Amino acid sequence: MFCIGCGTQLSPDQNFCRTCGHPVRHEPAQTAGSAPSAPQPSMPPPGMPPAGMAPPVRSQPVPVITAAPGVCPWCGAAVDVSQGSCPKCGATLGLPTMKAASGWTQLPARKDMAKLQIGNSSCQIEGTYVPVADMKLAAGDSVYFTHHVLLWKDTQVTVSTMSLRGGWTRMFAGLPLIMTQAAGPGHIAFSKDAPGELIPFTVQAGQSVDVREHMLLAATSNVAYDWFDTNVWFETRNDKDTEVHYPIGRFMDRFNSNSPGLLLLHAAGNIFTRTLAHGQSILVKPTALVFKDPSVDMHLHFEQPGALYSMWGSWGNRYLWLRLTGPGRVGIQSVFERIEGESRNMTRWSNATATQW
Amino acid sequence: MNEKSALACRACGAPLDIRNLVSESGWREAPRIRDMTEIHFNASTCQVEGEIVPAAEINLGSGDAVFFEHHVMLWKEEQVAMSVMQLSGGFKRAFAGMPFIITVAQGPGRIAFSRDATGELVVLPLHPGMELDVREHAFLLSSHQIGYSFVRVKGLCNILFGGQGMYMDRFVTTGAPGLLILHGYGNVFERRLAAGESIMVEPGAFLYKDASVTMDVEFQRLGSGFFGGTNMSLAKMTGPGRVGIQSMYVHHHTE
């Protein structure tokens, strides 16, 4: 057996390569008899044929067509592949989806200037580093958005405020107290000041989705905006200083709709999603979470060394995770912030599980 | 004018074999310059290298020079001579936090520039008679044929709430054509406004405009009925002329 990362010979009991640290994939019994594989390139070569003809090294990202023909791989809308891109979310159609063997799927590619249709209004997504959502609002249609995302607008587009329930508590938590609403007819465009991806999220009638705070760029006005207490927190104490930390924020946004609507989210870096089966769990960096279905449960999870752990009063090697349990879809971003207070002495915390090494 | 077989424009590097990306609302995306594209000006060439944080590498012909602000030089050959361009009003500019020393690099030799942020290089060949206003600190380099000055942003409102400081750089070409390279954060879009046509732009997103375009800050009053509301300031740009914006902008804490 050889390491697929560097080609070093491995013994069967190793879980990681001693030379390069690459995880060792133990082949199932029926393929164990096959010839030792030569070192494989870590990425499939460009233009590699899709599923079926892929080499048997399954720990590599393999382009596969996940959605049935006639269904958009991202939003699930019924589409005609000859259209080139999905009219609901702008995803390029007919392209293989990049799905890692671990189950994460990358946000599908979108052509620059892709156009989304939302009822009588439409939205064009322009640019690739810091994409702009350019909305063409029909008369009677409106969108709402948070602060600091309005890039430009036609002079005739009117903006007003939308009051939110529980304004006070939200302001204490540093959340936007008011949302701004823009009414058509006319053009209005939004962008956020960070390199990343714009996620068009279509909300079907009766569907709900939970989004981490500050991810919303804009939403069509038929999508109701609500929020809930995350109940994910921990308390640290340093001498007499007690501090409460909220690794995913104190509140989370919840969007639901009785008619089809569109959410535009902005996340940093690259975006990956997966669907968790009932009872299936995954640990993610709390600040990497972008969205989840309301059916997905979340709580803190600590991973730390046993016995010696507090000898030096240092918690530098303790990991703080967010445990997500299915059923439902979750989305994460590849750029995340450091969690404040992670390595300090913790006194209390919300519902959590733990693993000791 | 380019040869039929050319893949990129000699003057600005824009790829010629792909069509312009123009949104339905009229914004044209700054042409994505292909990696390693060569641009010609006078006796010099410029190569734009890299894509995420592109660098502009200039091969200066003898007698040619470029000028630039601090903190944008990436590397240079030893023989490229450096000097300082003296500007009028230096004290005022220093007070406003602007660089009041502009450095000049004299050919022959190679020198390269980049800026420390994800974005695009906007290559603007300027023809005689053109006047362009640019957001302060946004210019990466300019060839010596272009006259550099600055204008005070008009109106106290504009200065305080315009989100772009007190001065704008103004580039004027008189005799010969020249090359101006700007750096915009994120993606850059341009739109040509007809005479009298207006658009409201987030002040932090403004990147450049023709001198004929006027800019005024307008307040949008947003009442919440609780604390008496908040204000949102937007710059009203009125044509005729071009307006350039960037999609990633610096927050300004005025409201």
Image (spheres, coloured by chain):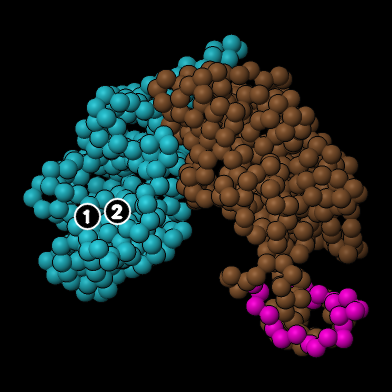
Residue nearest the observer in this picture, B164 or A329:
A329
Kind of residue indicated by mark 1 = Leu
Q: In the figure, the cyan chain has which letter? A: B
- How far from the left and from the top, in percent, is residue B74? 35, 64
State the extent of the magenta-drawn residues as a range. Answer: A22-44
For mark 1, does the 10 Å Cα neighbourhood hold few (<14), some (14 to 19), or many (20 or more) residues? many
Residues beneath discs 2 and 1 located on the same chain: yes
The label on residue B179 is 1
- How far from the left and from the top, in percent, is residue A240? 78, 40
What residue is rendered at 42% in x and 40% in y? Answer: B23
The label on residue B123 is 2
- Pointer 2 and pointer 1: residues touching (CB < 8 Å)? yes
Q: In the figure, the brown chain has which letter? A: A
Kind of residue indicated by mark 2 = Val
Give the main secondary structure, helix, strand or loop, of the magenta stretch: loop
Q: Does the magenta stretch include residue A41?
A: yes
In which quarter of the view is residue A79 placed? top right
B53 relative position to B69: left or right: right
A179 relative position to A133: left or right: right
